[in-house]
Image: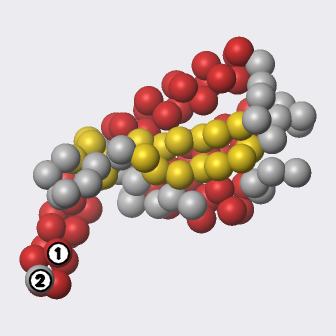
Amino acid sequence: MGLNREYALSSVGEGWSDLINYLYDNKPDDVVVTDVKEKYGTLRFYVVSCSEEFYKLIDEVEERSAAICETCGEPGETRFDLGWYKTLCDSCYNNLVEYLEISE
């Protein structure tokens, strides 16, 4: 059973959809996905159990997410100055900062 692809895609920003699709496309049929989320600015992809090879693939994709904007998918970096961790490109970061300043 586990989480289906559509639910996983809705769990994080659209910018990481290629990463999630890549993992689902390479996921062995017997692997159950239990959670997909953002944590400390990077993608997290949790499974019940799988081969060492698929665990390595998950680790590689999670590491790549630290350089991809979660919002739009462009190159980004993990930002620490928002009060939380978020991986964003300059444009999405500036838009978020502007929004937060207006909201205050």
Q: Residues within 10 Å of mark 2 (few under 14, many from 20)?
A: few
| Residue at x 17%, y 75% (from the top left corner) | 100
Residue 47: give x, y in percent of width and height: 71, 37
What amino acid is found at the position of numbered circle 1 in the picture?
A: Leu
Q: Which mark is residue 89?
A: none
| Residue at x 19%, y 57% (from the top left corner) | 83
Q: Residues within 10 Å of mark 1 (few under 14, many from 20)?
A: few
Judging by the rendered image, the residue that carries numbered circle 2 is 104
What amino acid is found at the position of numbered circle 2 in the picture?
A: Glu
In the image, residue 103 sits, relative to residue 69, either above or below, namely below
| Residue at x 88%, y 51% (from the top left corner) | 1
How does the figure colour the protein chain or chains? Answer: secondary structure
Q: Quadrant of the C terminus?
A: bottom left
Q: Is residue 68 visible?
A: no
Residue 48: give x, y in percent of width and height: 76, 35
- Determine the image quadrant of residue 93: bottom left
Is disc 1 placed on a helix, strand or loop? helix
Residue 26: give x, y in percent of width and height: 74, 33
- Marks 2 and 1: CB-CB under 8 Å? yes
Q: Residue furthest top?
A: 52
Query: In screen coordinates, is 44 left or right of 101?
Result: right
| Residue at x 51%, y 58% (from the top left corner) | 12
Q: Nearer the viewer, residue 8 or 72?
A: 8
Judging by the rendered image, the residue that carries numbered circle 1 is 100
Q: CA distance from mark 2 to mark 1?
A: 6 Å
In the image, residue 94 sits, relative to residue 76, either above or below, namely below
In the image, residue 83 sits, relative to residue 51, either above or below, namely below
Is disc 2 placed on a helix, strand or loop? loop
Query: In screen coordinates, is 85 left or right of 81?
Result: right
Residue 42: give x, y in percent of width and height: 41, 42
